[in-house]
Amino acid sequence: MAIIVQKYGGSSLADLDKIKKVASLIAEVKKAGHNVAVVVSAMGKTTDSLIASAKSLSSDPPSREIDMLLSTGERISMSLLCIALNDLGIKAISLTGSQAGIITNDRHTDARVIEVRPFRVQDELEKGNVVVIGGFQGVSYKRDITTLGRGGSDTSAVALAAALNAERCEIYSDIDGVYSADPSLIKNALHLPEISYQQMQEMSMAGAKVLNAQAIQFAKEAQITLYARSSFNPGKETIVRLLNPDIPSGVKAVVHENEVVKISLNFESNESFESLLLYFEQHKIQIKELNYFSLEEGSDFKISFVISVKNIIGWENRKGELLNKLKSKISFIVSLGAVSLIGEGLNRDNTILQSTLKLLNSKSIKPYGITTTSFRISLLIEQVHLNICVSSLHKRWIEKPIEVPTNI
């Protein structure tokens, strides 16, 4: 019997009525003759509420205790959903991430899945049970509870789908797939019926919230097709899978991210830089867009990089420690945002970047940094300009695309 893995996000489980509705949807799939494993997020804004409680007690709570705290949110969801399923006559059993065999490294609050041993899940499926698994969590090889970072329930679902050799993996949320921009910000955002793993991963890394970047990496490696759907408004979906490279056809999406900080440093030796990297690793701070250069041989070298601080618990403490330790060697540009153009082969020439910079200049928007890959052009700008920048670029490249002149 084919196995289907489904994942339901927090908005799909926000209250008891929605949990009952999700239970009825799962029951229909089970009655159609499928084995069903379901991964759930915490209800509604439960995770945010738990983090707020921790912060009210401490500005810098221990990351291990944060994991213990946050893992309770998914346990509530999975238990209530199983109760609702059993009430419909569908045998269901709930399992934590550790009971489901999700093994991670020991990096608290941002763990990485290193192995899935789904023996208990397989046993329960063979008994005819729907298995409901708490997403976003696992157990380290040290037997500590760990969490996988924001959006980690997607990763749980894809990792389980790979381990179970599932027929497909369906990701349900409050929107019906992937759009060319955040539909809550851009009313003319276009629905994307399908998208490649690479483009979806670039969107996720650049701030799109529909799917988790690590989950896309798992799907790409295991060649698992993902179906991004709405829980309660069926009809449209986005299929994420391996696609043949596009003929260069311009920008496919405009993605943005809030609460970005650019950090610049001057160092005299590689040892100092290595010490900084160790500090960031100890405090689970992920570096992005790293630039490392020296003006001449034997001189000090300069480093700049970007971090997203939205989900770093205790960031102000980290910033204060860095300023106290490095003093004038370090500087911060805060209140930034990032806007990214996503497509295929965007850096084959400079015309898209040139035209984009010209548009920003016409609106007096100054970029604080630019990064390009084959699939992405990202610009750092002041956060106050982020919405108008996203809107303008979406109109320019997606709503009203025009030929880019070669002599801008």
Image (cartoon, rainbow, N blue to C red):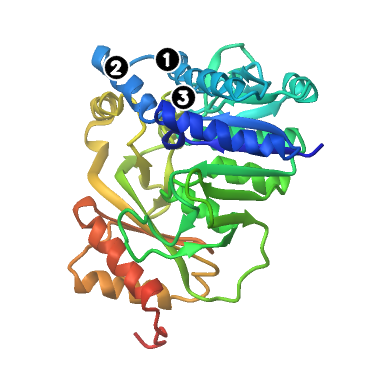
First in residue order: circle 1 vs circle 3: 1
The answer to which of 226 and 311 lies nearer the viewer is: 226
Q: Which tag is nearer the camera, tag 1 or tag 3?
A: 1
Binning the other alpha carbons within 10 Å of mark 1 as few (below 14), some (14 to 19) or many (20 upward) gives some
Residue 195 lies, in percent from the top left, at 57, 60
Amino acid at the residue labelled 1: Leu
Q: Residue at x 34, y 15 (%)?
A: 61
Res 354 visible: no
Amino acid at the residue labelled 3: Thr
Labels 2 and 1 touching (C-beta < 8 A): yes
Amino acid at the residue labelled 2: Ser
Q: Secondary structure at mark 2?
A: helix
Residue 339 lies, in percent from the top left, at 35, 57
Q: Residue 137 falls in which quadrant of the image?
A: top right
Question: Mark 3 highlights which residue?
Answer: 109
Labels 2 and 3 touching (C-beta < 8 A): no
Q: Secondary structure at mark 1?
A: helix
Quadrant of image for the C terminus: bottom left
Left or right: where 164 falls relative to 367: right
Residue 16 lies, in percent from the top left, at 42, 26
Left or right: where 325 falls relative to 254: left
The answer to which of 152 and 406 lies nearer the viewer is: 152
Q: Which mark is residue 69?
A: 1
Labels 1 and 3 touching (C-beta < 8 A): no
Q: Residue at x 60, y 25 (%)?
A: 88
Q: Name above or below for residue 69 compared with residue 168.
A: above
Q: Which mark is residue 53?
A: 2
Q: Residue at x 27, y 37 (%)?
A: 329
Quadrant of image for the N terminus: top right
Q: Name above or below for residue 180 compared with residue 148.
A: below
Distance from disc 1 to disc 3, alpha carbons, whole Å, reads 11 Å
Q: Which mark is residue 51?
A: none
